[in-house]
Amino acid sequence: MPYRVTLSGTDPILAHAPPDALLRTAASRLDLRQQSIFGRSPRPGPARGGGVVVARREQAGDPPDPRPAPRPPSPARSYPGRMAYPAQRPRRLRSTPALRRLVAETELRPRHLVLPMFVKEGAAEPVPISSMPGVVQHTRDTLRKAATEAVQAGVGGIMLFGVPARHDAVGSGATDPEGILNVALKDLRAELGDSTVIMSDLCLDEFTDHGHCGVLDEQGCVDNDRTLEVYARMGVVQAESGAHLVAPSGMMDGQVGVIREALDEAGFADTGILAYTAKYASAFYGPFREAVESQLKGDRKTYQQDGANLREALRELALDLDEGADMVMVKPALPYLDVLRTVADTADVPVAAYQVSGEYAMIEAAAAQGWLERERTIVETLTSLRRAGADVVLTYWATEVAGLLD
Ligand code: PBG
């Protein structure tokens, strides 16, 4: 009884296959089709069939074949001497912890994790952040201790944010060498030297009284090019204070290029730039606003990206690379895995993902209710970010997770 299996002539492998290979492929596809449609409970007994496979090479543009689909033979495959279906058993490689460990494709190691930290000017005690249970605004002293702990746990680096006591229209605290972020950078560099990678947020939102990431023009709009001048000074002060990498997060056009030029002119050719390349205007930053006591009213939609857009992220990526970014970042992380994967496939520099405050708060809140297993959920999300292409992951759980990993 002849069976007809149509193989597409446009299939890149089959297009050039010799006739016997075509026949074999047809036979195996027929086999699979029978098994998957009709072979749910193979009946014992001798195989019927002995059918002849007729393979026909279909060309693009062929009219549809009018012949009715052939009646399949008995699905029986479990007669003595023949292995029962399914012949392919991927579960074998999942059957013991050792096997799973051996074949795991994605690694999550402490060195991949970067801990974002907050330091508050004038604080005598660490101040808890209510929407981020377990995270605090550090004093200069507790910052040093917690950073040292993180490094001992093996984390790859630290990203520092400052919480100033005073705010003004141009964010003067950001460029003041005695501003909280800059003195804390000096503390960290003195304490940790080159034993870890010290990174600093390069943005004005923590320092301005209006809470925007740049300075405003007369109409109250964020003035891109005047902001760039401030960013350039900020970059140099942060490099002088000991940052290994500065991390512009304000999404101003041209920020990477201007900062690169300023660093080079000031003799900091070795200070790198971790560019927030695809930073989306996200509701997931909510708890962070509490963490830095943000003064913002309104939103950042005129400079941060629209969550609807992926192609635009690739444009930002091309510009950042062209302007000299040493590393690039996608942020937030979990809701933007597709962006992360695409950026990771495109960039020729290391890619970071920032698991932001809202991602942290969500899991902490659900775990506190007993609705999620906290540690498993955390590790699963971080592994997902690595699998989606992140070389580096910023996470508020960095120290804890570094301690959990074997
Ligand atoms: C801006 C900045 C923000 C975050 C990091 N850098 C907030 C924002 O853009 O509104 C958010 C980080 C987080 O939510 O964990 N300097």
Image (cartoon, grey):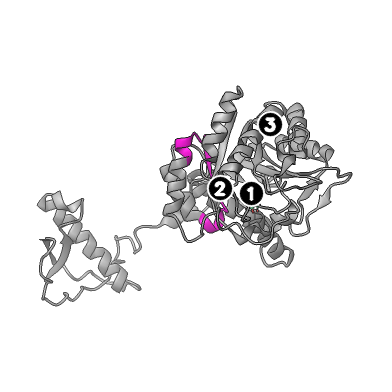
Residue occupying the far right of the picture: 124
Determine whether the beta carbon of the residue marked 3 sits less than 8 angstroms from the nearest atom of ligand 1.
no
Callout 1 touching callout 2 (CB < 8 Å): yes
What residue would you read off at disc 3?
A: 237
Could you tell which of marks 3 and 1 lies nearer the N-terminus?
1
Tell me residue 62's x, y (percent): 10, 66
Disc 2 residue crowd, few under 14, some 14–19, many 20+, Cα 10 Å: many
Q: Residue type at mark 3?
A: Val
Any part of residue 312 in sight: yes
- Residue at 54 percent of width and 50 percent of height: 385
Tell me residue 266's x, y (percent): 61, 24
Q: Which mark is residue 213?
A: 1
- Residue at 71 percent of width and 29 percent of height: 241
Tell me residue 46's x, y (percent): 23, 70
Where, quadrant-wise, is the C terminus in this rendering? top right
Q: Secondary structure at mark 3?
A: helix
Front-most of 190 and 292? 292
Tell me residue 283's x, y (percent): 62, 61
Q: Residue type at mark 1?
A: Cys
**Vertical relation: 394 (above or below) 258:** below
Could you tell which of marks 1 and 2 lies nearer the N-terminus?
1
Determine whether the beta carbon of the residue marked 1 sits less than 8 angstroms from the nearest atom of ligand 1.
yes
Span of residues in magenta: 320-336
What residue would you read off at disc 2?
A: 251
Q: Secondary structure at mark 1?
A: loop
**Vertical relation: 136 (above or below) 262:** below
